[in-house]
Image (cartoon, grey):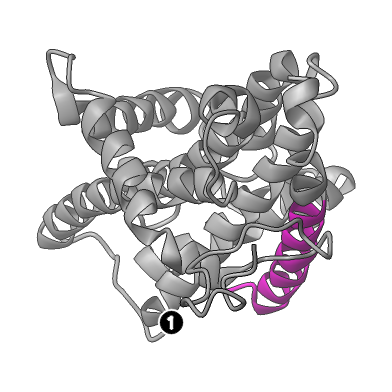
Amino acid sequence: MNPKENNTSPWLFEIKPKSSFFTLNLKEIWQYRDLLYLFVRRDVVTVYKQTILGPLWYLIQPLFTSVTFTIVFNNLAGISTGAVPSFLFNLGSITIWNYFSSCLTGTSNTFATNAGIFGKVYFPRIIAPLTTVISNLARFVIQLLIFFGFFIYFYWKGAQISFNQWSILLPIVIIVMGVLGLGLGMIISSMVTKYRDLNYLITFGIQLLMYVSGVFYPMSLIQSKMPEYAWIIQYNPVAYIIETSRYMLMSVGELPLLGMVYTTVVTIVVFLVGILLFNRTEKNFIDTI
């Protein structure tokens, strides 16, 4: 019965099918902000709750990875990082890369991971991938603080490193990185419900993407030593994010402004495609998951 016919107040919430594949109801997401907060808190607090070292794992992984990269790629392979200490160069790159890769891998299994709760209760499904992006942001901030600690140490030791006028725009680069990871993750998550083989390719693909994204070397190195393969880096939006972040954090290399414009356009397109596939998949994924 229509509540208006019974002289009562209208419904507080009305659940109805989406009228467009591109629907992104920000008002509804805001209404469920408490649920989003609980999911983020769950991810941040409970993941390491039953571990011995707990949150220290946030620090151990980038530190050990940076040490390994410094030994293998800088000391053994002889890759130069200029005036910037190799360890600090790698730590900054790994910190940026970890946020992107965590967003991508976390959101790529959205439907498979949340199939149980999706089939029992309604809430905006996009809250699940948003939870991954925001919870990983908390980890990223912790790791970035560790980077700043080492930055101060090397600066005090006389290293030629400094911030610059572009450093204030680092949050914008981080947002672009998170949205790109969210968009790619939603695309993969939508495809995984139908093509399970993608689960086995995600880990391998992430590792391969790291090597072609300039994580442990500057973009100029590929352009000078292997120009025939430079196009692999030049068409990779993640490489521009890492190169830009390094410039903003350590004033190393050059600021690829045109590259960031290209990256922003790619990010918007990927995000829109991700919303399209995500909205289409959430209507019937429970029958195929």
Question: Image quadrant of residue 49?
Answer: top left
Identify which amino acid the numbered label 1 is placed on: Trp
In this view, the residue in front, 182 or 78, is 182
Count of numbered circles in the view:
1
* Residue at the front extreme of this rendering: 6
Residue 262 position, x and y percent, is 76, 70
Residue 80 seen: no
In this view, the residue in front, 15 or 146, is 15
Above or below, 102 against 158 in this view is above
In the picture, measured across the screen, residue 24 lies left or right of residue 121, that is right
SS assignment at label 1: loop
Give the main secondary structure, helix, strand or loop, of the magenta stretch.
helix
In this view, the residue in front, 59 or 14, is 14
Residue 90 position, x and y percent, is 40, 42
Q: Residue at point 20% right, 47% down?
A: 146
Q: Which residues are magenta?
A: 254-276
Figure quadrant of the C terminus: top right
Residue 4 position, x and y percent, is 59, 78
Q: Residue at point 76% right, 42% down?
A: 187
In this view, the residue in front, 268 or 189, is 189
Is-magenta flag for residue 271? yes
Residue 157 position, x and y percent, is 12, 56
